[in-house]
Image (spheres, helix red, strand yellow):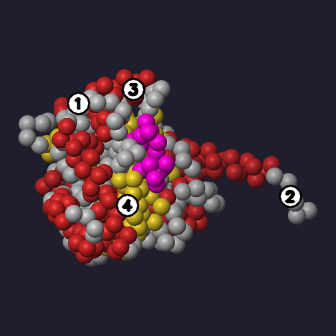
Amino acid sequence: MTTTHSSPTAGVVSAGAGIFADALDSQAVPVSRVDWRPPMTGSEADLATVATDPLRAEANRRAVEAVLGVQAMVVDVAPAHEVLGLERGQFLHAGPPLTWDMASGPMQGALMGAAALEGLVDDPEDAAVLFADGGTVSFEPCHHRRAVGPMAGVVSPSMWMWVLEDPEDGRRTYCSLNEGLGKVLRYGAYSPEVLTRLRWMSDTLGPILAEAVRETGPVDATAILGQMLQMGDEAHNRNRAGTLMLLRDLAPALVRSSADPGDVADAFAFIGGNDHFFLNVAMPACKLQMDAARGIEGSTMVVAMARNGTEFGIQVAGTDDEWFTGPAQIADGLFLGDFGPEDANPDIGDSAITETTGIGGFSMATAPAIVRFVGGSVPDALATTRRMGEITLAENNRWAIPVLDFLGAPTGIDVSKVCRTGVLPQINTGMAGRVAGVGQVGAGLVTPPAEIFPSALAALAARTRARAEQSVRAPDVTR
C-alpha cells in the first residue's frame, strides 16, 4: 500500500515490505514508513466481530484497572498440604492440563522425583508406573489451584509455598521455593543430591522463612518489582536485585529467629547464592495481578500464558478458565557446556506469567545484561520492549523502564492486537534437557505458537455473537 502526495514536497507513505521504501530512499525521495502487517490468516471475520463488540472497550478498561490496582504482599510461607489442600499422591504441574503419556522428559522426571520426595517410592524410576497407571496418584495444573510453578512446576504436599495476598480483597496466590539452577527438580532432575536439597528446604528453609515473614509482616512484592526494573533486573531470568532486596527485608527477623544459628547461616548462604530466588515471589505476584481480570465478559486480555513442556496454553479474561493450546516451541538461545539444540526440551513452565504482566521478556530493556544469558543483543532488548507495546492494552507506571524515558512496562496482552498485527509475545526462558534427569541445558528466547491466538479470538467472537443473538431474542420488557 502506498500513498503519493502531489504537493511540492512530494513524498511517499510505504507500508509492508521495505524494498520499495529502500529504493526511494536511495533516490532521495522522502518516505514515511508504516509498520503494517496483514492480520493472522483466518482471523479477519472474528476480528471484525470482536472489534464491534459493545462490551469490549469497557471490559478492557475494567480489566486494566483491576490488574494495575493489585498490590501483591508476601504474607506467609507454608506447606502445600496446608494452603493448597494437596493430599498424599496429589501433585501440581506447570502449564495447561496433560496426561502422563504426553508429558515431556523433564515433566516426567520432576513428577518422579516428587513421588520419591513424598515417600511413594524409594527409587524415582519406580514412580513411572504409578503415574502411567493413575490409580494412586494424580496431577493437575498449578493454575487450577491459584498457584504457579517455574519450569516443570511440580508441587507436592510437603513442599513449602510462598503465600501472596492482595489486601484489597484478600485473594491469594502461591508458588514453591526456588531451588537454584542446574540439576534441580524443576528442570526434571531427581538425583539423590536433588532430593536431599528439597528435604532440607522443607525441613529447614521453609520453617525459617515462615517465621521471618510472620515477624516482619507483609513484604511488598509489587514495590520490589518496581525497584528491580530500575536496578538491572527484568524479573524472569534476572532476579539478582530482587533476591537481595527480599533478603534485606527478611534479614533482621532471620537473625532473631528461634532457628539454630548454623541453619540460619545456611539459609543466608543459599538465598544469597541463588540469584533466581526471587523469581518464585515475582511469579505469584504476577498471577495475583492477572487473576484480578478473570471472568470479565468481553475482555480480550490474556490472563495466563503457561507451558507444560509439550503444549503452550493461554487463558483470556473474557473466556473464563478455557485453555487455548498449541505445540510448545524450542527456545533459541545459549547452551551450557556441550549441550545443543538437540538436547533441549520444548518450552516449559508457568514463569511466562511474568511476560503476561509486562515484565520478563516484555521489559528486557531494563536488563540489557540479560542478553549474555539468553542471547540476542542490547538493541534487540530495547526493540523488544517497544514492540510489545504494540500488542498490549496499557503501561504499568509502577514498573517504569528508565532507559526508555521511564516508559511503563507494556501490560495486558490483547488477543485482538496479536491477531491484527501478527506480533507474538516475546518470552525469555531457561531450557530443560529433553531427557528426564538431565536438568538445565541452556536459556533463550521463545514465542508462543501463533495459532493459539486466533483460537482464543474465535471463542471471544462466538461469545459476542451469542450475546447479540440473545439480545435479539429477548422480549422488550419495557412495553
Residue 387, labelled with which disc? none
Identity of the residue drawn at 47% across and 68% down: 166
Tags 4 and 3 in contact by the CB under 8 Å rule? no
Tell me the CA gap for discs 1 and 3.
Answer: 19 Å
Task: Pick whichever of labels 1 and 4 is earlier in the sequence.
Answer: 4
Tell me the CA gap for discs 4 and 2.
Answer: 54 Å
Describe the element under mark 4 as helix, strand or loop: strand
Task: Pick whichever of labels 4 and 2 is earlier in the sequence.
Answer: 4
Count the marks: how many? 4
Identity of the residue drawn at 66% across and 47% down: 465
Q: Is residue 72 left or right of residue 195?
A: right
Task: Using the image as rendered, state which of residue 241 and residue 3 is in the foreground.
Answer: 241
Name the amino acid, label 1: Val
Q: What percent of the width, then of the height, locates residue 62? A: 56, 67
Residue 476, labelled with which disc? 2
Q: Is residue 69 left or right of residue 223?
A: right
Name the amino acid, label 3: Leu
Q: Residue furthest right?
A: 479
Q: Which residue is mark 4?
A: 77
Of tags 1 and 3, the one toward the viewer is: 3
Q: Which residue is mark 1?
A: 435
Tell me the CA gap for discs 3 and 2.
Answer: 59 Å
Q: Which residue is mark 3?
A: 130
The residue segment tinted magenta is 80-95
Tags 1 and 3 in contact by the CB under 8 Å rule? no
- Categorize mark 4 by other alpha carbons within 10 Å: few (<14), some (14-19), many (20+): many
Residue 315 versus residue 63 in the image, above or below = above
Image quarter for residue 214?
Answer: bottom left
Task: Pick whichever of labels 3 and 2 is earlier in the sequence.
Answer: 3
Task: Pick whichever of labels 1 and 3 is earlier in the sequence.
Answer: 3
